[in-house]
Amino acid sequence: MAFNDSILLVEDDPADVFMYRKALEPHMNGAIHCEGRAAGVSASLQTVRPAFVVTDLKLPGADGTSVVRMVRDIGALPVIVCSTSDDPADVKRSYAAGANAYVRKPRDLDGWSELARCLVCFWGQLNLQPQ
């Protein structure tokens, strides 16, 4: 089943944006909206109503926990922090900010494909959100 809604991706690394797109697009009919900085998230959420937000933890200017807090201020959208860091302090800080999940960035295409499949299946299809 294809995912028809959109996703907001907050990621500053063009290589990671490419990998997200390559992995997510086979599972989606909806759009992947990309922001390279936390500062652009509020404006994006005024024009796009994604099913969920995926943010990198290490962003220029402000980190992913800022993104989590911005989204929390706006509404009940799920926010997934996806980072290369497995530092317990980063995980704890992300959840304390209100993240719904924290996952490690994959190392290869198979890992990116599995991450995309899991994100779309759980957050896009199985998880029920308030209307």
Image (cartoon, grey):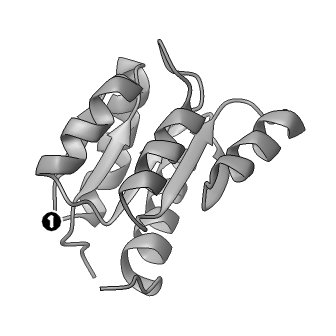
**Secondary structure state at the residue bearing disc 1:** loop
**Mark 1 surroundings: few (<14), some (14-19) or many (≥20) residues within 10 A:** some
Q: Position of residue 86 (x, y in %)?
A: 80, 36
> Does residue 93 appear left or right of residue 41 in this picture?
right
Q: Which amino acid type corresponds to the residue marked 1 in the rendered image?
A: Asn
- Image vertical order of residue 59 relative to residue 53, above or below: above
Q: Position of residue 48 (x, y in %)?
A: 16, 53
Q: Residue at x 28, y 39 (%)?
A: 42
Q: Residue at x 35, y 42 (%)?
A: 9
Q: Quadrant of the N terminus?
A: bottom left
- Image vertical order of residue 108 relative to residue 123, above or below: above
Mark 1, residue position: 29
Q: Nearer the viewer, residue 61 or 123?
A: 61
Image quadrant where residue 36 sits: top left
Inspect this view and state whether residue 102 appears. Answer: yes
Q: Position of residue 5 (x, y in %)?
A: 21, 68
Q: Nearer the viewer, residue 107 or 103?
A: 103
Image quadrant where residue 121 sits: bottom left
> Does residue 23 appear left or right of residue 4 in this picture?
right
Inspect this view and state whether residue 106 appears. Answer: no
